[in-house]
Amino acid sequence: MLSILIPIYNFDCTTLVENLLIKINESVEYEIICIDDCSTESNPGLENLATKKNVVLIKLETNLGRSSIRNLLVEKSKYPWLLFLDADILPVQSTFIENYIDAISEYPGIKVFFGGIKYREIDMQNNNHLRYKYGINRESNQVDKRRKTPHLSMLMSNTILHRSVFDVVQLNPTIKKYGHEDAVFSYDLYKKGYYVKHIHNPVFHTGIETNIVFIEKTKVAVENLLNLYELGILNPKVNKLLQTFLKIKRFGFSRTFAMIYNKFGLKMEQKLDHDNPSLFIFDLFRLSYLCAIYHQKK
Protein backbone atom coordinates (compact mmCIF):
# COMPACT_ATOMS: atom_id res chain seq x y z
CA MET A 1 0.00 0.00 0.00
CA LEU A 2 2.98 2.34 0.45
CA SER A 3 5.60 3.61 -1.99
CA ILE A 4 8.45 5.47 -0.31
CA LEU A 5 10.05 7.83 -2.83
CA ILE A 6 13.53 9.29 -2.33
CA PRO A 7 15.26 11.57 -4.85
CA ILE A 8 19.05 11.55 -4.55
CA TYR A 9 21.57 14.16 -5.59
CA ASN A 10 25.11 14.06 -4.19
CA PHE A 11 24.02 12.38 -0.98
CA ASP A 12 24.25 8.84 0.37
CA CYS A 13 20.80 7.89 1.68
CA THR A 14 21.83 4.42 2.86
CA THR A 15 21.36 5.33 6.53
CA LEU A 16 17.84 6.62 5.82
CA VAL A 17 16.83 3.48 3.89
CA GLU A 18 18.20 1.17 6.57
CA ASN A 19 16.39 3.22 9.21
CA LEU A 20 13.11 2.91 7.29
CA LEU A 21 13.49 -0.84 6.80
CA ILE A 22 13.72 -1.28 10.57
CA LYS A 23 10.58 0.79 11.10
CA ILE A 24 8.32 -0.92 8.55
CA ASN A 25 6.01 -3.55 9.96
CA GLU A 26 6.11 -6.85 8.08
CA SER A 27 2.35 -6.66 7.53
CA VAL A 28 2.73 -3.52 5.40
CA GLU A 29 3.07 -3.84 1.64
CA TYR A 30 5.74 -1.39 0.60
CA GLU A 31 8.50 -0.45 -1.79
CA ILE A 32 11.35 2.03 -1.48
CA ILE A 33 12.40 3.67 -4.72
CA CYS A 34 15.57 5.75 -4.84
CA ILE A 35 16.53 7.63 -7.99
CA ASP A 36 19.94 9.25 -8.30
CA ASP A 37 19.42 12.37 -10.40
CA CYS A 38 22.79 12.21 -12.17
CA SER A 39 24.89 13.07 -9.11
CA THR A 40 28.21 14.78 -9.77
CA GLU A 41 29.80 13.18 -6.70
CA SER A 42 30.51 9.47 -6.27
CA ASN A 43 28.46 7.59 -3.65
CA PRO A 44 29.76 3.99 -3.54
CA GLY A 45 27.50 3.18 -0.59
CA LEU A 46 24.40 3.50 -2.76
CA GLU A 47 25.25 0.28 -4.60
CA ASN A 48 24.25 -1.74 -1.53
CA LEU A 49 20.69 -0.37 -1.62
CA ALA A 50 19.68 -2.51 -4.60
CA THR A 51 20.50 -5.66 -2.64
CA LYS A 52 17.95 -4.90 0.07
CA LYS A 53 14.43 -6.29 0.11
CA ASN A 54 11.80 -4.16 -1.70
CA VAL A 55 14.36 -1.45 -2.49
CA VAL A 56 14.90 -0.20 -6.04
CA LEU A 57 17.84 2.00 -7.05
CA ILE A 58 17.78 3.83 -10.38
CA LYS A 59 20.63 5.98 -11.69
CA LEU A 60 19.97 8.62 -14.31
CA GLU A 61 22.46 9.73 -16.96
CA THR A 62 20.82 13.15 -17.29
CA ASN A 63 19.78 15.49 -14.48
CA LEU A 64 16.01 16.06 -14.44
CA GLY A 65 15.80 18.67 -11.68
CA ARG A 66 13.98 18.90 -8.37
CA SER A 67 10.41 18.59 -9.65
CA SER A 68 10.73 16.17 -12.56
CA ILE A 69 12.70 13.67 -10.47
CA ARG A 70 9.78 13.38 -8.05
CA ASN A 71 7.33 13.01 -10.93
CA LEU A 72 9.49 10.16 -12.25
CA LEU A 73 9.54 8.52 -8.82
CA VAL A 74 5.75 8.46 -8.88
CA GLU A 75 5.76 7.06 -12.41
CA LYS A 76 8.00 4.18 -11.26
CA SER A 77 5.90 3.43 -8.15
CA LYS A 78 2.99 1.00 -7.81
CA TYR A 79 1.19 1.54 -4.49
CA PRO A 80 -1.71 3.93 -3.74
CA TRP A 81 0.02 5.97 -1.01
CA LEU A 82 3.14 7.96 -1.91
CA LEU A 83 5.55 9.00 0.86
CA PHE A 84 8.00 11.66 -0.34
CA LEU A 85 11.21 11.93 1.69
CA ASP A 86 14.41 13.84 1.07
CA ALA A 87 17.64 11.86 1.08
CA ASP A 88 19.14 13.86 3.97
CA ILE A 89 16.50 13.22 6.62
CA LEU A 90 15.96 10.67 9.40
CA PRO A 91 12.63 9.84 11.08
CA VAL A 92 12.38 11.03 14.66
CA GLN A 93 10.05 8.36 16.02
CA SER A 94 10.38 4.57 15.84
CA THR A 95 6.68 4.50 14.86
CA PHE A 96 7.21 6.84 11.89
CA ILE A 97 5.63 4.61 9.22
CA GLU A 98 2.96 3.38 11.62
CA ASN A 99 2.01 6.97 12.46
CA TYR A 100 1.24 7.75 8.83
CA ILE A 101 -0.74 4.54 8.38
CA ASP A 102 -2.75 5.36 11.51
CA ALA A 103 -3.42 8.90 10.22
CA ILE A 104 -4.68 7.51 6.92
CA SER A 105 -7.10 5.27 8.80
CA GLU A 106 -8.18 8.00 11.23
CA TYR A 107 -8.88 10.61 8.52
CA PRO A 108 -10.31 8.67 5.56
CA GLY A 109 -11.35 11.83 3.72
CA ILE A 110 -7.85 13.37 3.80
CA LYS A 111 -5.50 12.72 0.91
CA VAL A 112 -2.42 14.79 1.89
CA PHE A 113 -0.47 14.68 5.18
CA PHE A 114 2.65 16.54 6.31
CA GLY A 115 4.56 15.30 9.37
CA GLY A 116 6.91 18.19 10.09
CA ILE A 117 10.64 18.94 10.22
CA LYS A 118 12.99 19.07 13.21
CA TYR A 119 16.68 19.77 13.75
CA ARG A 120 19.24 18.14 16.03
CA GLU A 121 21.89 20.16 17.83
CA ILE A 122 24.34 17.36 17.09
CA ASP A 123 24.18 18.29 13.38
CA MET A 124 25.26 21.88 14.02
CA GLN A 125 28.91 22.45 13.15
CA ASN A 126 31.20 25.48 13.34
CA ASN A 127 30.41 26.50 9.75
CA ASN A 128 26.66 25.83 9.36
CA HIS A 129 24.97 27.98 12.00
CA LEU A 130 22.97 29.99 9.44
CA ARG A 131 21.16 26.99 7.92
CA TYR A 132 20.62 25.47 11.36
CA LYS A 133 19.21 28.70 12.82
CA TYR A 134 16.98 29.24 9.78
CA GLY A 135 15.68 25.68 10.05
CA ILE A 136 14.96 25.93 13.77
CA ASN A 137 13.15 29.27 13.48
CA ARG A 138 11.42 29.01 10.10
CA GLU A 139 10.87 25.30 9.35
CA SER A 140 10.70 23.45 12.66
CA ASN A 141 7.17 24.45 13.63
CA GLN A 142 4.78 22.68 15.96
CA VAL A 143 1.56 21.22 14.58
CA ASP A 144 -0.66 24.02 15.94
CA LYS A 145 1.38 26.70 14.19
CA ARG A 146 1.55 24.76 10.92
CA ARG A 147 -2.21 24.28 10.89
CA LYS A 148 -2.78 28.05 10.84
CA THR A 149 -1.23 28.22 7.35
CA PRO A 150 -1.45 24.60 6.13
CA HIS A 151 -0.42 25.18 2.53
CA LEU A 152 2.43 27.55 3.41
CA SER A 153 3.91 25.09 5.90
CA MET A 154 4.12 21.96 3.74
CA LEU A 155 7.50 20.65 2.54
CA MET A 156 8.04 17.73 0.20
CA SER A 157 10.80 16.40 2.45
CA ASN A 158 8.19 14.62 4.59
CA THR A 159 4.82 14.48 2.82
CA ILE A 160 2.52 11.55 2.12
CA LEU A 161 -0.32 11.75 -0.36
CA HIS A 162 -2.69 9.49 -2.25
CA ARG A 163 -1.94 8.63 -5.85
CA SER A 164 -5.30 10.04 -6.92
CA VAL A 165 -4.05 13.49 -5.89
CA PHE A 166 -0.99 13.14 -8.06
CA ASP A 167 -3.19 12.14 -10.98
CA VAL A 168 -4.59 15.69 -10.76
CA VAL A 169 -1.61 17.74 -9.49
CA GLN A 170 2.02 16.98 -10.33
CA LEU A 171 5.12 18.95 -9.48
CA ASN A 172 5.75 21.61 -12.10
CA PRO A 173 8.46 20.21 -14.42
CA THR A 174 9.64 23.70 -15.39
CA ILE A 175 11.14 24.06 -11.89
CA LYS A 176 14.64 22.64 -12.17
CA LYS A 177 16.70 24.94 -9.95
CA TYR A 178 16.84 25.01 -6.17
CA GLY A 179 13.93 26.58 -4.33
CA HIS A 180 10.14 26.91 -4.18
CA GLU A 181 8.97 23.72 -5.89
CA ASP A 182 7.25 22.88 -2.59
CA ALA A 183 5.38 26.20 -2.55
CA VAL A 184 4.22 25.86 -6.15
CA PHE A 185 3.01 22.30 -5.60
CA SER A 186 1.27 23.26 -2.35
CA TYR A 187 -0.53 26.17 -4.01
CA ASP A 188 -1.58 23.92 -6.90
CA LEU A 189 -3.06 21.55 -4.31
CA TYR A 190 -4.89 24.48 -2.74
CA LYS A 191 -6.34 25.57 -6.11
CA LYS A 192 -7.64 22.05 -6.70
CA GLY A 193 -9.29 21.96 -3.27
CA TYR A 194 -6.96 19.48 -1.54
CA TYR A 195 -6.55 20.08 2.18
CA VAL A 196 -3.15 19.43 3.81
CA LYS A 197 -3.50 17.68 7.16
CA HIS A 198 -0.65 18.52 9.53
CA ILE A 199 0.28 15.86 12.09
CA HIS A 200 3.13 15.30 14.53
CA ASN A 201 5.34 12.81 12.70
CA PRO A 202 8.58 14.72 12.13
CA VAL A 203 11.88 13.92 10.52
CA PHE A 204 15.29 15.35 11.36
CA HIS A 205 16.90 17.35 8.57
CA THR A 206 20.49 16.18 8.91
CA GLY A 207 22.10 17.52 5.72
CA ILE A 208 22.73 21.05 6.93
CA GLU A 209 24.76 23.08 4.43
CA THR A 210 27.66 25.30 5.41
CA ASN A 211 26.98 29.02 5.68
CA ILE A 212 28.71 29.71 2.38
CA VAL A 213 26.84 26.98 0.49
CA PHE A 214 23.50 28.05 1.98
CA ILE A 215 24.09 31.69 1.03
CA GLU A 216 24.82 30.69 -2.56
CA LYS A 217 21.79 28.39 -2.67
CA THR A 218 19.70 31.23 -1.25
CA LYS A 219 20.71 33.44 -4.17
CA VAL A 220 19.65 30.72 -6.61
CA ALA A 221 16.35 30.34 -4.73
CA VAL A 222 15.69 34.11 -4.89
CA GLU A 223 16.45 34.16 -8.62
CA ASN A 224 14.13 31.19 -9.08
CA LEU A 225 11.45 32.94 -7.01
CA LEU A 226 11.44 35.99 -9.27
CA ASN A 227 11.44 33.86 -12.40
CA LEU A 228 8.54 31.71 -11.21
CA TYR A 229 6.54 34.80 -10.28
CA GLU A 230 7.16 36.48 -13.63
CA LEU A 231 6.13 33.29 -15.43
CA GLY A 232 2.90 33.22 -13.43
CA ILE A 233 3.79 29.88 -11.84
CA LEU A 234 4.15 31.00 -8.21
CA ASN A 235 1.44 32.98 -6.44
CA PRO A 236 2.55 35.59 -3.87
CA LYS A 237 0.02 34.11 -1.42
CA VAL A 238 2.40 31.25 -0.66
CA ASN A 239 5.62 33.23 -0.21
CA LYS A 240 6.19 35.98 2.35
CA LEU A 241 9.38 37.26 0.70
CA LEU A 242 7.54 37.78 -2.55
CA GLN A 243 4.67 39.50 -0.73
CA THR A 244 7.12 41.92 0.92
CA PHE A 245 8.91 42.61 -2.37
CA LEU A 246 5.66 43.45 -4.16
CA LYS A 247 4.61 45.74 -1.31
CA ILE A 248 7.82 47.81 -1.30
CA LYS A 249 7.79 47.84 -5.09
CA ARG A 250 4.25 49.24 -5.03
CA PHE A 251 5.36 52.04 -2.69
CA GLY A 252 8.43 52.83 -4.79
CA PHE A 253 11.17 51.57 -2.45
CA SER A 254 12.52 48.64 -4.48
CA ARG A 255 15.37 50.69 -5.97
CA THR A 256 16.43 51.72 -2.48
CA PHE A 257 16.65 48.09 -1.41
CA ALA A 258 18.52 47.24 -4.60
CA MET A 259 21.07 49.92 -3.70
CA ILE A 260 21.38 48.41 -0.21
CA TYR A 261 22.36 45.07 -1.75
CA ASN A 262 24.74 46.63 -4.27
CA LYS A 263 26.52 48.55 -1.52
CA PHE A 264 26.32 46.16 1.43
CA GLY A 265 25.64 42.72 -0.09
CA LEU A 266 29.16 41.40 0.45
CA LYS A 267 29.27 42.74 4.01
CA MET A 268 25.94 41.04 4.76
CA GLU A 269 27.31 37.75 3.45
CA GLN A 270 30.32 38.12 5.73
CA LYS A 271 28.03 38.81 8.69
CA LEU A 272 25.96 35.74 7.87
CA ASP A 273 29.03 33.48 7.71
CA HIS A 274 29.27 33.61 11.47
CA ASP A 275 28.55 31.43 14.50
CA ASN A 276 25.65 33.67 15.54
CA PRO A 277 24.07 34.97 12.32
CA SER A 278 21.14 37.36 12.40
CA LEU A 279 17.99 36.22 10.63
CA PHE A 280 17.04 39.90 10.30
CA ILE A 281 20.18 40.45 8.21
CA PHE A 282 19.42 37.25 6.31
CA ASP A 283 15.93 38.53 5.46
CA LEU A 284 17.33 41.91 4.44
CA PHE A 285 19.93 40.14 2.31
CA ARG A 286 17.27 38.09 0.49
CA LEU A 287 14.92 41.04 -0.01
CA SER A 288 17.61 43.43 -1.22
CA TYR A 289 19.04 40.77 -3.55
CA LEU A 290 15.57 40.19 -4.99
CA CYS A 291 15.21 43.93 -5.64
CA ALA A 292 18.69 44.09 -7.17
CA ILE A 293 18.11 41.28 -9.68
CA TYR A 294 14.66 42.65 -10.49
CA HIS A 295 16.11 46.03 -11.48
CA GLN A 296 19.01 44.43 -13.32
CA LYS A 297 16.45 42.87 -15.65
CA LYS A 298 14.78 46.21 -16.35
Image (cartoon, rainbow, N blue to C red):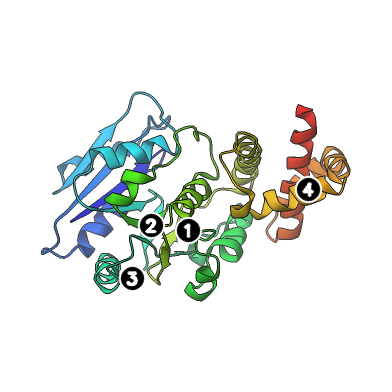
Circle 4 residue? 268
Mark 2 highlights which residue? 159
Contact (Cβ within 8 Å) of mark 1 with mark 2: yes
The answer to whether residue 243 is visible is yes
Secondary structure type for disc 3? loop
> For the residue labelled by badge 2, is the local secondary structure a helix, a strand or a loop?
strand
Comes first in the chain, label 4 or label 1: 1
Cβ atoms under marks 4 and 1 closer than 8 Å: no
111 over 298 or under it: above or below: below
Cα–Cα span, label 3 and label 1: 19 Å
Residue 267, located in which quarter of the rendered image? top right
- Depth check: give the residue in front, 44 or 84: 84
Q: Earlier in the sequence, mark 3 or mark 1?
A: 3
Task: Name the quarter where the C terminus is drawn.
Answer: top right
- Kindly identify the residue that appears in the image at 78 percent across and 48 percent down: 268
Q: Position of residue 71 (x, y in %)?
A: 35, 39
Secondary element at image label 4? helix
Q: Amino acid at mark 1?
A: Met
Which residue is identified by label 3? 93
- Sequence-wise, which precedes: disc 1 or disc 2? 1
Q: Residue furthest left?
A: 27
Neighbours of disc 1 within 10 Å: few (<14), some (14-19), many (20+): many
- Residue 62 is situated, as x and y percent measured from the top left of the image, at 38, 24
> In this rendering, would 266 be left or right of 16?
right
- Residue 67 position in % (x across, y down): 43, 39
The span from disc 3 to disc 2 (Cα, nearest Å) is 15 Å
Q: Which mark is residue 154?
A: 1
